[in-house]
Each structure stands twice: as structure tokens, then as C-alpha cells.
Image (spheres, rainbow, N blue to C red):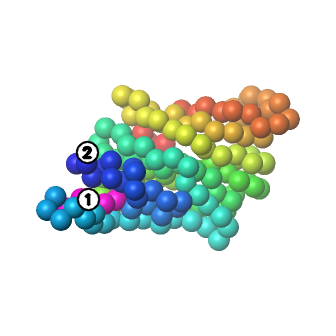
């Protein structure tokens, strides 16, 4: 299973089209066994992908539209999507206030908490903004 996931991480992640592949040991070719595409009528792109304990997948990025029923705040917003190991979407979170925000990188700890970092021109959770782009760090549990 780890081989399959490494192939996914290295070769199958491209913008907002997500695909998993497995390598056929005899022929050396990769075969897609699921793929998922999300997006809006505006532009959207993925910036990070990571796995956690149950071989489930998190994808982060930036969207300029109302992704999966989430309202767009004004400009670019952060998104975080969770897929199970079969490629079924579990949930989508979108965060944005007024100006540009983007989730750039993420990781998952041993308790399946998700940490997303990136940049924003707004203040979150009572934090003030410096008038330019600031760095943020957000923590989510596996339920979003």
C-alpha cells in the first residue's frame, strides 16, 4: 500500500485533479485506480497533499470560487479537503475573510491533527494583520 501512496504523492497530484495509481509489478506500468476532480467556475489549485494513519488523504490549496457549496469571501480563499483511501470525499473546509489567503503546506501528527500553514492579508481568530501578507498556522482535528 505504501508503494501505491508514494506513486500518488510523486506522480499523480496536479492542480485540482487528484488521482491514485498503482504500479504493476510485472510490466512496470502504473494503473489509475481512482481519481477525483474538484473546482469552481473560477480558478482553483492544490498546493499540498498528505496522508495520515488510515491511508486517508488531505489536500490543501487556494480557491477563488464557492468550492463544494462553501461561499467565497471575496478573493482567494484557503481550502482543505479530506478523502478516504478509496477516493471518496469526506469533507471540505474553506476559510477566507476579505483578501487573499492561501494554504501552502500541511502536515498531520500522530493524533491525526492537521496543521496548515500559508499566508493571509487578514487577521484570524482575533489576531491582527500587519497590513501586508502574514504567515498563519491553523490546526484542525480529523473531523475538520
Q: What residue lies at 18% left-to-right and 65% top-to-bottom?
A: 27
Q: What residue lies at 68% left-to-right and 59% top-to-bottom?
A: 64
Q: What residue lies at 51% left-to-right and 38% top-to-bottom?
A: 106
Q: Earlier in the sequence, mark 1 or mark 2?
A: 2
Instruction: Provide residue 130's location: percent of width, then percent of height.
Output: 83, 30
Mark 2 secondary-structure assignment: helix
The magenta segment: 20-24
Residue placed most toward the observer, 70 or 84: 84
Name the residue beneath numbered marker 1: 22
In the figure, is residue 69 to the left or right of 85?
right
The main secondary structure of the magenta stretch is: strand
Residue placed most toward the observer, 69 or 131: 131
Instruction: Provide residue 41's location: percent of width, then percent of height.
Output: 65, 71
Residue placed most toward the observer, 87 or 73: 87
**Which numbered tag is attached to residue 68?**
none
**Which numbered tag is attached to residue 2?**
2
Tag 1 and tag 2, C-beta contact below 8 Å: no
Toward the right, the furthest residue is: 131
Amino acid at each position: 500500500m505504501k508503494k501505491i501512496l508514494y506513486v500518488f504523492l510523486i506522480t499523480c497530484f496536479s492542480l485540482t485533479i487528484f488521482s491514485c495509481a498503482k504500479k504493476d509489478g510485472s510490466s512496470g506500468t502504473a494503473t489509475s485506480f481512482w481519481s477525483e476532480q474538484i473546482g469552481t467556475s473560477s480558478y482553483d489549485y492544490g498546493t499540498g497533499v498528505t496522508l495520515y494513519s488510515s491511508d486517508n488523504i488531505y489536500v490543501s490549496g487556494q480557491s477563488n470560487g464557492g468550492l463544494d457549496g462553501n461561499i467565497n469571501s471575496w478573493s482567494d480563499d484557503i481550502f482543505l479537503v479530506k478523502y478516504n483511501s478509496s477516493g471518496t470525499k469526506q469533507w471540505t473546509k474553506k476559510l477566507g475573510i476579505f483578501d487573499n489567503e492561501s494554504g501552502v503546506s500541511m502536515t498531520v501528527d500522530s493524533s491525526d491533527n492537521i496543521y496548515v500553514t500559508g499566508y493571509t492579508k487578514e487577521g484570524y481568530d482575533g489576531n491582527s494583520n500587519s497590513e501586508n501578507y502574514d504567515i498563519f498556522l491553523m490546526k484542525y482535528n480529523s473531523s475538520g
